[in-house]
């Protein structure tokens, strides 16, 4: 599993039948800031994910890639390799909070 921030959406009017009705979101994977572990920073990569939880732009989410993306009831029949499986409320390293969705500015 990876942390990622939703940065946009993808609209595709022509696609295989299995993908009709699937919400596609652009996400940027995140990592802990190496310098001081003060927060989450982008890895500089971008993925397209099927949204299974109703995520929105700017939210931090949990994503899975590869065959794990097809392990939910909603994604089992889909030809995908990346899925959003959770919305992140907070991230802690030891006793230190490095992300809190309630206090983050959007």
Image: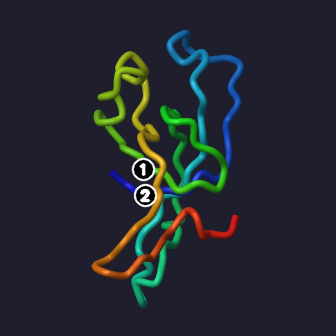
Q: Name the residue nearer the viewer: 55 or 11.
A: 55
The single residue placed furthest to the top in the displayed view is 17
Disc on the earlier residue, 2 or 1: 2
Q: Residue at x 46, y 55 (%)?
A: 88
Question: Which corner quadrant of the image does residue 25 belong to?
Answer: top right
Residue located 38% across and 55% down the image: 2
Tell me the SS state at disc 2. strand
Q: Which residue is mark 1?
A: 62
Position of residue 42 measured from the top left corner of the image (x, y, whole percent):
53, 68
Pointer 1: residues within 10 angstroms few (<14), some, or many (20+)? Answer: some
Identify the residue position indicated by label 2 in the image.
Answer: 3
Tell me the quarter of the image containing the C terminus: bottom right
Q: Position of residue 26 (x, y in %)?
A: 60, 46
Query: Residue at horizontal 42%, vertical 77%?
Result: 97
Q: How many marks?
A: 2
Classify mark 1: helix, strand or loop: strand
47 on left or right of 66: right
Q: Please state the horizontal and vertical placement of residue 7, each as a whole percent of the image.
A: 65, 53
- Residue 70, image quadrant: top left
Residue 42 higher or lower than 2, as above or below: below
Near mark 2 (Cα within 10 A), the count class, few <14, some 14-19 or many ≥20, is: many
* In this view, 58 is above or below 56: below
Pointers 2 and 1 in contact (CB under 8 A)?
yes
User: In screen coordinates, is 73 left or right of 103?
Assistant: left
Q: Residue furthest front?
A: 102
Residue 105 or residue 65, whichever sits in front: 105
- The residue shown at (36%, 44%) is 64
Q: Between marks 2 and 1, how big is the CA–CA gap?
A: 5 Å
> In x, y percent, where is residue 12?
68, 25
């Amino acid at each position: 599993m990876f942390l990622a921030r939703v940065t946009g959406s993808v609209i595709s009017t022509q696609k295989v039948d299995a993908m009709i009705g699937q919400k596609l979101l652009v996400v940027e994977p995140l990592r802990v800031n190496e310098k001081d572990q003060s927060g989450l920073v982008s890895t500089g990569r971008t993925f397209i994910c099927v949204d299974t939880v109703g995520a929105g732009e700017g939210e931090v989410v949990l994503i899975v890639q590869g065959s794990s993306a097809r392990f939910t009831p909603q994604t089992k029949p889909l030809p995908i390799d990346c899925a959003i499986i959770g919305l992140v409320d907070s991230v802690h390293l030891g006793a230190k909070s490095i992300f809190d969705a309630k206090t983050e500015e959007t």
